[in-house]
Amino acid sequence: MLGIIDWGIGGIGIYKLVKEQMPDTGVLYFSDTGATPYGKMKRRELAARVDAVIEFLKENGMTRLVIGCNAASTSIPDLRNHGIPIVGVIEPAVEMAARFQPERLGVIGGRRTILSGVYRSIFAERGIVIEQRIAQPLSALIESGDLSSSKLQEEARRILKPIHNCSHILLACTHYPAIRPVLENYVSDRTIFINPAAAVVKKLRNIKGTTGVGDRFFTTGDPKKMKRSANLAFEVDLVAAKKVSI
């Protein structure tokens, strides 16, 4: 079974691609909206939380894992050895963006993701200078089911204004592809948005693992809100999610 962990429904974009490209793969999806947002947790707290979720999913049959959240992916170096392959979203995102050979690369992401400096340092190793923007509160708005309100559009305009002429902008949060049509209104006509979900799934295809049977969805938050938000953001009709406590 493949596990996908995210604080919310952002990883559903990865789930959707997995089901399109690897339809025989059973998925255990974990949305942790009942916990403090991962981007607001301290480093050790975040690693401990992700460790606990991983163990829960292993108890439910998980044999390989995608951490479908940029903030949580910054914690990978601090995780315990869980004895399973773990794929984060950061390395695949950098590899994908670098292949575009961007003239001017912007990166938008959550506060923890940007302030960690992880993207800046990894891109620097490839000789690529980036311009970063903290994109709060976009993910929270998307999580609530808001894909087009005046508030969301104003926040998108504010966030993108300093980097609107970038040749490429990396979406360093799995929620953001859900509002790509809105983001495109506030950048140059030549700007290309990079959604790394495909690169994550490509990396996953190279990792052997048992296929599993059926998909199951868990959340520490509200299952009904999770189902509604996933449908609005990614047009995925989830089977009922099970509320759990960890």
Image (tube, grey):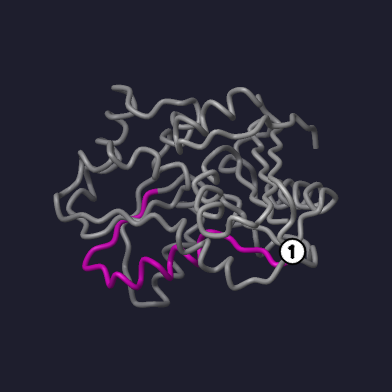
Q: Amino acid at mark 1?
A: Thr
Q: Residue 94's quadrant in the figure?
A: bottom left
The quadrant of the image that shows the N terminus is bottom right
Taking the image as drawn, is residue 70 in sight?
no
Q: Position of residue 213 (x, y in %)?
A: 74, 51
In the orientation shown, which residue stands out farthest toward the right?
A: 59
Identify which residue, 235 or 9, lies in the foreground: 235
Identify which residue, 108 or 203, lies in the foreground: 203
- Give the residue number, with chain letter if any, for mark 1: 210
Q: Residue 135's quadrant in the figure?
A: top left
Left or right of 132? Residue 52 is right
Q: Position of residue 108 (x, y in %)?
A: 37, 49
Q: Position of residue 224 (x, y in %)?
A: 62, 23
Query: Which residue is painted at 43% across and 48% down in the image?
Result: 109
Q: Is residue 94 magenta?
A: yes
Label 1 SS: loop
